[in-house]
Image (cartoon, rainbow, N blue to C red):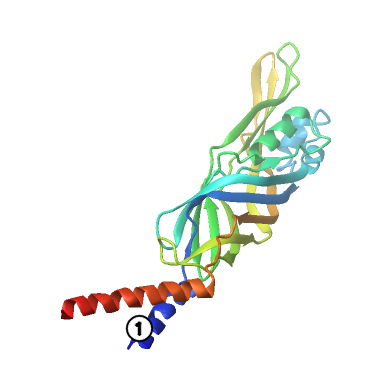
Amino acid sequence: MIKRNLFAVMLAVGATGVASAYDFDGADWKYNFSGHYSIANVDANNNGLIGNVLGVVFNLSAQLNLINGTTSATNYGTTINQSALTNFSVNDLHMSATNGGGLLPSLGNFVYNLLDFSNGVYMGTEGSGNVTLTRGSLLSADLFALVDTRVIGTGVVLDLRAAIPTSTLTGTVTGVDGGPSGPYGGGRANYITGDSGLMDTIAIQARARAYVANIATLDTGYLNVGAIENRADMWSLSRSPQAVPEPASLLGIGAGIVGFVRRRRKNKAI
């Protein structure tokens, strides 16, 4: 009977290491990320409206095609708050962007700010070791009068607008502590290896207005002129593994539990 009870205890202790769910909760995570962004699907003509209005004043197509740069985060501390067995939130996945070269300063700063997701909170789900992190859409960004060529009320004004859409990261749990389970019944996850790929596509719209003596003679309205493709090249979430109990220690724990149960039964018999 004692051997059978001891075996059951050891089986229960060992089973925690192969549970299908994981525990992510903790303020000790480090976020590492590297990626890049570039403009895709540039259309600066839009039936000729923007091209005809701006003429040689501002080559929008050439400027947009110069938008490219990198994004990164190095050992950025973050917190994961777990709310259920397979649901959690990752707070503040900060990512800094470099400014694309060769741009008008205002356009470059506009793109830089779009890609600086310092307030990004991602909702996470996990199933079979696969992790999906999703950030909801952020507020639209506007850049009014990027170009203003008016002299004594006559000239052209160019505005830009962009909506920051839902962003998604995917990855796999590749590190799990082998010790006892955490509060959600699974092994304590300590490493998430991210997948590379497209995170989001930010559409850019432009609006051209022509003025003569401060009177608007033409307004194209906002037209789609391109999209920023924001890509992850490498990312991970990691924290230090916890110490794994030695087999002898586990055996001692099991034997202690069995001894306690045996003494309790003996006391009842008395």
Percent of width and height locating residue 261: 29, 76
* 197 relative to 13, above or below: above
Residue at 73%, 16% in the rendered image: 154
Q: Nearer the viewer, residue 77 or 245?
A: 245
x then y, percent, for residue 190: 57, 60
Nearer to the camera, 148 or 264: 264
Nearest the viewer among 190 and 166 is 190
Residue type, mark 1 in image: Asn
The residue carrying mark 1 is 5
Where the N terminus falls, by quadrant? bottom left
Q: Is residue 138 above or below residue 192?
A: above
Q: In the displayed structure, does residue 3 sit left or right of residue 223? A: left
What secondary structure is marked by label 1?
helix
Quarter assignment of residue 177: bottom right
The picture places residue 143, in percent across and down from the top left corner, at 65, 29
Residue 19 appears in the figure: no
Residues packed near mark 1 inside 10 Å, few (<14), some (14 to 19) or many (20 plus): some
The quarter holding residue 131 reads bottom right
Q: Residue extending furthest front?
A: 270
